[in-house]
Image (cartoon, rainbow, N blue to C red):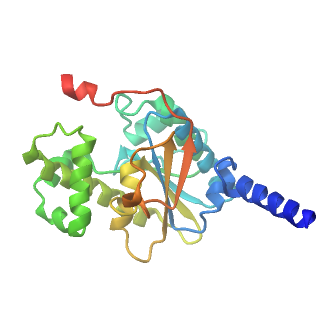
């Protein structure tokens, strides 16, 4: 009997090592394959999240499974596809039209260059800023999500702007959010390759399967979504069930009032 219990404990420990929160990133990523697309939703200012993303790129690329690295942080129409594996950081930034003020290269450069060194194209997937004004008045974007999901997306826009956005701006800003998700979904479709996985790195709100990019993918494109979560989240409740295929936790960040700048802006 003792032997059976000991074996069960050992098996549980083994399972935790291979798939649990302390498992190596490569093993956790492998557990989600095969899939046409893997979306990692980060907290932008969490250094541990950028490290996990780089390790995921390296793990998939080392197995020849990475079709492309797509980024919310670069606009559609920009790509490193013409660069060779010895390209410099400056060349990669130029190819991607990188905005260092919005997205510090110190944070994202390592994951980008891991893909470049592996000969994997890095592709801008976000809706270009020049097209966002048109998106604000594009009524067709109002019907891309079902009614309940669209209402939830509007609520997410309110929360994301600290409930300080004037109500008449909610619909236009929601259209931009939906337009950005559609653009990233279209980039996935363009980049996919049989037997490989397209990796998209975005904010967690874009990664959710109930509101974000996965909602805009064709049914023949398989997708897995991972949320990178720094510490515990008060948002984790019954309403978020099914939003992600996995939540990978990292240590909590120091408390920060993200709304302070908006209140004084």
Q: Image height check: is 191 above or below 115?
A: below
Instruction: Work out whether residue 144 can be spotted.
Output: no
Depth check, front residue: 187 or 174: 174
The image quarter containing residue 197 is: bottom right
Q: Image height check: is 67 above or below 93?
A: below
The image quarter containing residue 217 is: bottom left
Depth check, front residue: 155 or 29: 155
Residue 85 is left or right of residue 100, and the answer is right
Residue shown at 32% from the left, 60% from the top: 211
Residue 198 lies, in percent from the top left, at 51, 60
Residue shown at 59% from the left, 70% from the top: 195
Residue 168 lies, in percent from the top left, at 7, 47
| Residue furthest bottom in the image | 220
Residue 5 is left or right of residue 70, and the answer is right
Q: What is the tally of numbered marks visible in this picture?
A: 0
Depth check, front residue: 168 or 30: 168
In the picture, which quadrant includes the C terminus?
top left
| Residue furthest top in the image | 264
Q: Image height check: is 44 above or below 228?
A: above
Residue 130 lies, in percent from the top left, at 20, 45
Residue shown at 51% from the left, 67% from the top: 36
Depth check, front residue: 133 or 181: 181
Residue 23 lies, in percent from the top left, at 69, 50
């Amino acid at each position: 009997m003792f032997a059976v219990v000991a074996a069960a404990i050992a098996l549980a420990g083994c399972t935790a090592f291979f798939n649990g929160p302390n498992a190596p990133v490569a093993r956790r990523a492998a557990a989600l394959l095969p899939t046409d697309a893997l979306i990692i939703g980060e907290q932008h200012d969490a250094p541990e999240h950028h490290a996990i993303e780089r390790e995921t790129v390296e793990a998939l690329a080392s197995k020849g499974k990475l079709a492309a690295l797509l980024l919310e942080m670069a606009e559609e129409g920009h790509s490193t596809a013409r660069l060779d594996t010895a390209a410099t950081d400056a060349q990669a930034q130029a190819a991607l039209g990188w905005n260092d003020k919005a997205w510090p290269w110190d944070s994202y450069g390592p994951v980008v260059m891991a893909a470049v060194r592996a000969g994997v194209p890095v592709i801008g997937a976000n809706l270009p800023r020049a097209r966002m004004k048109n998106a604000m008045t594009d009524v067709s974007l109002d019907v891309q999500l079902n009614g309940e999901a669209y209402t939830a997306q509007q609520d997410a826009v309110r929360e994301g702007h600290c409930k300080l956005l004037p109500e008449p701006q909610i619909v236009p800003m929601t259209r931009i959010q939906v337009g950005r998700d559609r653009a990233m979904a279209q980039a996935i479709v363009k980049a996919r390759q049989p037997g490989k996985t397209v990796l998209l790195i975005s904010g967690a709100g874009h990664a959710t399967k109930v509101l974000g990019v996965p909602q805009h993918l064709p049914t023949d494109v398989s997708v897995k979504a991972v949320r990178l979560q720094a510490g515990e989240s008060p948002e984790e409740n019954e309403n978020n069930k099914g939003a992600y295929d996995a939540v990978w936790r990292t240590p909590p960040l120091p408390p920060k009032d993200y709304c302070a700048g908006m209140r004084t802006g």
